[in-house]
Structures are given as structure tokens and as C-alpha cells.
Image (spheres, coloured by chain):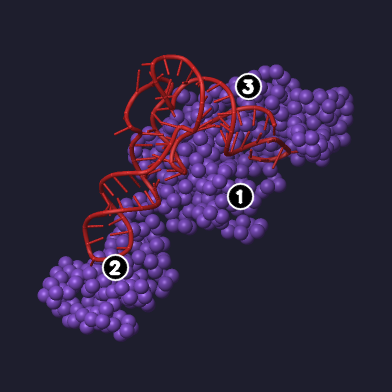
Chain colours: A purple, B red
Amino acid sequence: MNKNIRVRFAPSPTGPLHIGGVRTALYNYLFARKHGGTMILRIEDTDQTRFVPGAEDYIVNSLAWCGINFDESVGVGGPHAPYRQSERKALYKQYSDKLIASGHAYYAFDTAEELETLRKHAEAEKQTFTYNTETRKTLRNSLCLSAENVNELIENGTPYVVRFLIPENTEVAMDDIIRGKVCVKSETLDDKVLFKSDGMPTYHLANIVDDHLMEISHVIRGEEWLPSLPLHVLLYEAFGWEAPEFAHLPLLLKPDGNGKLSKRDGDRLGFPVFPLEWTDPFSGDKSSGYRESGYYPEAFINLLAFLGWNPGTEQELFNMDQLIQSFSLERVGKSGSKFDPEKTKWFNHQYLIRRSDEEIAAEFMPFLLEKGIEADMQFVARAASLVKERLNFVKELWGETYFFFQSPESYDDQVIKKRWKDETPSQMLALTEVLQNIEPFDAPSIDAGIKTWIEANNFGMGAIMNALRLLLVGASKGPHLGDIMALIGKEETLMRIKKGIETIK
RNA sequence: GCUCCCAUCGUCUAGCCCGGUCAGGACGCCAGGUUUUCAUCCUGGUAACAGGGGUUCGAAUCCCCUUGGGAGUACCA
């Protein structure tokens, strides 16, 4: 593995990139960085009919958010520009011609309709029609037609495609870094179209040509490509090129039931499958994103890295640098992973509690502003420090801290029933006198003052504190009461107690 | 259907290559503890080698079959 490591992520801009795609990009990135190699982004937009406006930008933005950056790409350019296949269109025909000249490919004039009919017929007999060593002898192509005939058809502008000529009776031996040796008989392969009648190459041709031209050393891609690996290997052979090494990554599967994770699963199951929110430009449908759901990119990357790979140690929290250090294709598993949305929350929690109070406060400010609350940064940071352990996401902060910013709007009926006794109002009133005299009004002093008063009067700790909590918070939750009172201040504390006594009757 | 890939707790997985630990960790779940509440936290528990054959003194680990799952089977990528 001494030659230059050059890997590429080659998405098709037919829609938003889902988490499986992001993981593929991530593994490529980690591999490149680990080995001091080059990371390339190539846009495979050879299918003009599937162009989706905004998809390419979405892909670029998503990867940028994840911290996956490229050395060569559509945006930053590079020695092999352009990096968008539609802009390399002129290039591919000569390679297609080369293959025809060397006898590795041929012209086919069968129309899409004709082939469709053949497939329908085959299907009716529970068979599958394939354009292969057998059937190609009976179809309209340059293998059967005379040279003059073929020339005439082409001169007349008859639409044609170029198909790869699968060799007969050979075994295609392949090597995959993750799967080891794979062997396929050539008869089971079909003569794939390499060059379409619209003048564009198919994925197979463009992909091999570009990987070769861009000097890609390792092709790291999803397992859905494994079935076309024989074709690709044969193509390299036909061109007389050295093939790169291959690594086919296991798929990400649906959390429930069967099948690979798809765009629809996210909103059906209530978790995002996309890194960023995406609005379909045609239907206007919105799909949620990890970023908008409150995930940190570090957490997102961490959890994605662990879907199919692990370091072999018990450490689970890795930042990007650590991932780069530890990553290896040898430790990527072979079997597909069911995506577990539950664990993603735990990852985010881990990153959240490691953030400073000030950082969390800053992230929370917009949420407060939305509620019309302009709070002091230090105050918010202090509130965050008291509750951050219980959060998975910053957006949950309001539910845990609202009582720092406003007095209760209502009082939980269940708690009133349980904690509000006949003697409670007078006790609470007496407590205001006690609190009034506590100086300084900080948590230790408040705690000590209340405790002394409770013991002197032989009250129950639970009875007093739970009732007090009801008045201050409105419910039976929240951090230590002394901390709450100290933070909201004496005046607010006394006000809430009095207001509560009036309201609960 | 055909071709190829895969198979350890509910989930992500370690262990497998180079057979020999009560099959380990994490998420979740359950219980107990801490606590003035709710959480957090701590401790403990639950739970797996798909099945069947071999090979071997010994198999999660090597081989075969079955079953199950996945992918592909387009002038899409």
C-alpha cells in the first residue's frame, strides 16, 4: 500500500444524501486522512432525467457540516477537473470507441420498447430477460448485423447504445478488502450498456474511466455495488488498466422489519435519515435533518462511524481526529447494521454534557429569544449547569429551566393533591419570614436556614420542601431547590410563594 | 427465479483469521442505592453464538448442508 492513496466519494445528485451515503463518505475520508491520502468529491450526474435542483449543493453542505472536506472537488477544483461528469461528457465517447475497436464492446440498436417487450414476455413465463451471451446472438446489434448494415444505421442517425461484450466461459476473480475473494462465472453476467443513446455514458463506463483518470487507488462504496464488481473488473481488463482496490461496505438497514434503510423510513419512524433538513423541490415535502433536530455534528459522525466499524476496544466516544487515528478497513464488519435511533440520542447526550455551560447557554439563547425572553448570559449558563446532565439536546433545555425565567403558569393537580395539606399555606407563609432574613441569599445559606427552621418546628422535610417546590416550579421536578432560589433571587422567591398560596386554594 | 453477499443478547458489536476464558462492552429495559421532587449518577440484573451434520480430546471460532436476511438483476446511480 505504498502508492499514493486517492479515494473518492461519488454521489449522484438525484436527491438528498442519506445517512448511509454520509457514512460511505466518512469512511472514505477517514481512510484518506489516516494514510495521508487525497479525498475527492466527484458528482456522477450522467442521468439527465434524474436531475434534482439543489441536490448537489445539499450534498456539499451536508458533508461540510459533518466536517468531511475534500482536497479535490467541484468546489475547490484540482488537477483532474472538472469533477462533474456531465462536464466531462466529451471524454467518455473515445473510451467507448476504444472498446469497440478492441472488440470488447459492440453497437446495439434495440429500442427501449423492444427490450421492454422482451422483458414482459420473459416475466410472463417467470423468467428474466437478460442481454447476455445467449440472447445477444438474436438481437439487433453489430455482432449479428453486417458491417455495412451497421455503418448505414449509424450514418442514418439510428439511435444506438454501446454494450460491453461479456467474455464467454470465464471466471471473474475479484478481491475485496472487506469480503475477501469473490468469484463469478461470466455466463451469469449481462452485456451492460456502457454508452447511452443520448450520448452520455452510463455509470459503469464513466465510473471506471474517471477512477482510472483520477488515479483512484481504493474504491470504498456501498455493498449495493458488489453485483457490478465483475463488470468493473472486466472493464479494467479490457482497457488494460490496473484496477484499484475495492472495499464494499455493509448496508444500513431499517430499524424495524426488513430491507435497507430508505428515505421514507425516517419520517415514518420519527427520526431523521438525512444530515440536513431537505425540502423536495417538486413536491415541497419536507424531510427532517440531524442538524435541525439538534444533533451536534461530532455526535452524528461518531455514531455513524460505529455503524459497521469499531476500534476493537471499549472506547465509544471518538472525535474526528481520533477516528482518523483508529480507523481501518480491516475492522469494518461484513453484515448490515440495523439503524438504532435510540442510541443516537445517547451519543448526543455525551457530547452535550462535555460542552461548557457557556457554550450551551449560547446555543440556548435563540430559543429564549423566540419566547421573548432576554436573559443574561451568566444567568443562563448557571441554569444550564444545573440541568445539563439530564439533557440529550439543547432544545430540551426550556422544559428543564422555564422556572428560572418565569413563575409557574399552573400547578400540577397531582402534586397539589399529594403535597398540599390544610396546614401547608400557613407553613409556607411562615417560611417567607425565614427566607426574608437569610443573607447572603445563596444555596448553602438557604439550605441551612430552612433546615434549622424545619427542625425547630418539627416539620417534615419532605412535606415542606415538596410544597415549596410546587410553589416555585409548579410541578414535582427540577434541580435542587436551594440552587433554584439562589438563582432566581429572594424577591422572586417570596413573590412566587405568596402568589402560589393565593392561587392554590 | 437467477447471481452474489451476510448470520453472536431486542439493537450496535468484541471474540472468529491463529479452535481451549462463567461468550465481554455499549444502547435499551428491569431492580436496588443516593436524593426534599423529577432527572442525573452509582451498583446489580435481564438477554445471544439461527438449525443440522461433520473435523477434533475440545468448535461461537475450521468444513458442508439447511434455514433466514440482504443486495443486484434498467439506455438509474
Residue at left 84%, top 30%?
Answer: A140
Q: Quadrant of the C terminus of chain A?
A: bottom left
The amino acid pointed to by label 2 is Phe
Return the x and y of residue A277 as percentages of the image width and height. 53, 56
Q: Earlier in the sequence, mark 3 or mark 2?
A: 3
**Residue A10: in sight, yes or no?**
yes
Image height of A102 relative to A291, above or below: above
Quarter of the view holding residue B67 = top right
Instruction: Specify whether disc 3 shares its chain with disc 2.
Output: yes
Which numbered disc flags the more N-terminal residue, 3 or 1?
1
- Secondary element type, mark 3: strand
**Residue A172: image tag:** 3
State how far apart marks 1 and 2 are (Cα). 43 Å
Looking at the picture, tell me which residue is in the foreground, A434 or A31: A434
Chain identity of mark 3 = A
Q: Measure the alpha-carbon separation of dots 3 and 2.
A: 68 Å
Residue sitting at x 43%, y 70%: A370
Disc 1 residue type? Gly
| Vertical relation: A114 (above or below) A296 | above
Same subunit: marks 1 and 2: yes
Query: Percent from the top left, x then y, of residue B70?
Result: 58, 39
User: SS of the residue at dot 2?
Assistant: helix
In x, y percent, where is residue A417? Answer: 33, 75
| Residue A83, quarter of picture | top right
Judging by the rendered image, the residue that carries numbered circle 2 is A379
The answer to whether the residues at label 3 and label 2 have Cβ atoms under 8 Å apart is: no
Percent position (x, y) of residue A206? 65, 34
The image shows residue B25, relative to residue A426, as above or below, that is above
Label of residue A15 in the image: 1
Query: Which amino acid does the dot numbered 3 rest on?
Result: Val
Whether residues under marks 1 and 2 lie with C-beta atoms below 8 angstroms apart, the answer is no
**Mark 3 to mark 1: distance in Å?**
34 Å
